[in-house]
Image (spheres, rainbow, N blue to C red):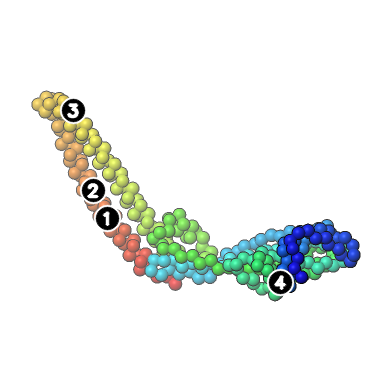
Amino acid sequence: MKLPAGPVTIYDGGTYAGDALIKFLPEEEKRLITYGEDLSVTGSFTEDISIRASSIKIDNGVLFFDKKHISDTIYTFRNAEKKSKKLIIEHPIDPQAVLVDMADYGEKTHNFYRFTVTLPPTTDFFTFTVKEKRTIYERHKLMDIPSRMISEYIEDKRFYPKTLIKALQKTLDLKKKIFDAEIDLKNLLENRKKLVDNQERIRKNLEAAGNQTQQGKEYLQRMIKEDAAIDDLDEKVASLEKSIEKEKREYEEYFNNMVIK
């Protein structure tokens, strides 16, 4: 029969056992109803997660990394009474995981696996383990991976073969080489800007003093000297910019042609 949502009173063998609230119950439907607490049974659970690499490769500069997450959920119970108890363990369903090395569950709802076990009449602890595994698929274009993440890959040698570690180390070295060159270029441009700004100040002083005065002649010599310094910096900037472009091309070619299986 259909039952509307609302309160119900539970009797066990004609004896009042407790009260409960139920949601709407359609015909031929079944629900577990919580109506009381068995104070003789205590329980807890812990989780132990391990990660294993199942597949690692680099193809055309893309890192394909498949990891298996193995999760052990350990349920621990204790029965203080001298008679056994029927126990139903509701374990949340992870839609991305599958059960491993487990006997068939008794029931499965939208949200839970239900395992039925017998809790022996003992003061010892009783454990029940649910093992699950799920595969996580990671895809990273190596050129887009931050140096920090590449360093973490290199330091964590549990998953990666030596050939991959060596390739990642080279990518890190190439990135650092470009980064250092860009820092040098930034410093050169900053120095050039300081010289240009200083030249503008000297030019204004020269206009004020006149180029025929002793002070004006000194200003003129300083401008000539700084002109030469600016020309020298311009050559260094142009050379460094070409070098950076070349290193970036080599970097891209190395990634795009990288294949490690």
> In this view of the protein, which residue sits in the foreground, 171 or 131?
131
Please name which of the two marks, 1 or 4, marks the residue nearer to the observer.
Answer: 4
User: What distance separates the C-alpha of mark 1 from that of mark 3?
Assistant: 38 Å
Tell me the residue that label 1 is attached to: 243
Identify the residue at image location x=18%, y=28%: 205
> In this view of the protein, which residue sits in the foreground, 7 or 141?
7
SS at circle 1? helix
Residue 9: x and y in percent read 83, 60
Tell me the residue that label 3 is attached to: 205
Residue 250: x and y in percent read 31, 62
Q: Amino acid at mark 3?
A: Asn
Do callouts 1 and 4 mark residues in contact (Cβ within 8 Å)? Answer: no
- Dividing the picture into quadrants, the one containing residue 148 is bottom left
User: What distance separates the C-alpha of mark 1 from that of mark 4?
Assistant: 67 Å
Identify the residue at image location x=68%, y=70%: 108
Residue furthest left as drawn:
212
User: What distance separates the C-alpha of mark 4 from that of mark 3?
Assistant: 92 Å
> In this view of the protein, which residue sits in the foreground, 37 or 213?
37
Do callouts 1 and 2 mark residues in contact (Cβ within 8 Å)? Answer: no
User: What distance separates the C-alpha of mark 2 from that of mark 4?
Assistant: 74 Å
Residue furthest bottom as drawn:
104
Tell me the residue that label 4 is attached to: 107
Identify the residue at image location x=88%, y=60%: 16
SS at circle 4? strand
